[in-house]
Image (cartoon, rainbow, N blue to C red):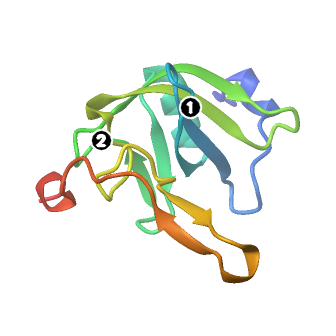
């Protein structure tokens, strides 16, 4: 007997059983991070309204904020038109989504002429990662 919710059938996971998940600030619209979800992470996220991802490096579920305290409360869960990307509109506890201590993981911007362009860090560290992850 399948206990998976019917809505899960519309979700297209890749060959590793994963789907990219974009976390977006529900108020400002700022993209905070991109991570991966498997079926279990997506189901738990939907059930608890707290962001849960699949950590590819640790090969286990990663409940956002479990170490840092920077939990993501999910306000809206969306599926793209092809069914292969999840969008989470979240409230980011503590205002820090990135392990570098910044609000967003997208803190570098490409600047300069194309032939000599460079990635420039444009967003400040809000909290030293040494103080976040002990």
Residue at x-position 40% and y-position 66%: 58
Instruction: Answer left or right for 50 relative to 93.
Output: right
Spot occupied by residue 92 in the image (x, y as percentages of width and height): 37, 30
Instruction: Answer left or right for 2 relative to 62.
Output: right
What kind of element bears circle 2? loop
Instruction: Answer left or right for 134 relative to 21.
Output: left
Spot occupied by residue 76 in the image (x, y as percentages of width and height): 58, 19
Which image quarter: residue 9?
top right
Query: Which residue is denoted by mark 2 in the rendering?
Result: 65
Quarter holding the C terminus is: bottom left
Q: Is residue 6 above or below residue 65?
A: above
What kind of element bears circle 1? helix
Residue at x-position 69% and y-position 62%: 16
Residue at x-position 61% and y-position 65%: 110
- The circle drawn on residue 43 is 1
User: Farthest residue in the right direction?
Assistant: 82
Q: Is residue 114 above or below residue 56?
A: below
Of label 1 and label 2, which has the lower sequence position?
Answer: 1
- The tally of labels here is 2
Circle nearer the viewer, 1 or 2: 2
Spot occupied by residue 125 in the image (x, y as percentages of width and height): 28, 53
Q: Nearer the viewer, residue 116 or 26?
A: 116
- The circle drawn on residue 104 is none
Quarter holding the N terminus is: top right
């Amino acid at each position: 007997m399948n206990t998976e919710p019917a809505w899960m059938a519309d979700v297209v996971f890749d060959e590793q059983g994963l789907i990219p998940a974009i976390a977006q600030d529900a108020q400002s619209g700022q993209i905070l991070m991109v991570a991966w979800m498997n079926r279990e992470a997506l189901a738990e996220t939907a059930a608890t309204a707290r962001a849960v991802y699949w950590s590819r490096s640790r090969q286990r579920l990663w409940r956002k904020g479990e170490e840092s305290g920077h939990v993501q409360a999910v306000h809206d869960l969306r599926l793209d038109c092809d069914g292969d990307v999840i969008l989470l509109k979240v409230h980011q506890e503590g205002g820090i989504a990135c392990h570098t201590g910044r609000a967003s993981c997208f803190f570098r911007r490409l600047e300069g002429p194309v032939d000599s362009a460079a990635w420039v860090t444009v967003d400040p560290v809000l909290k030293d990662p040494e103080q976040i992850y002990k």
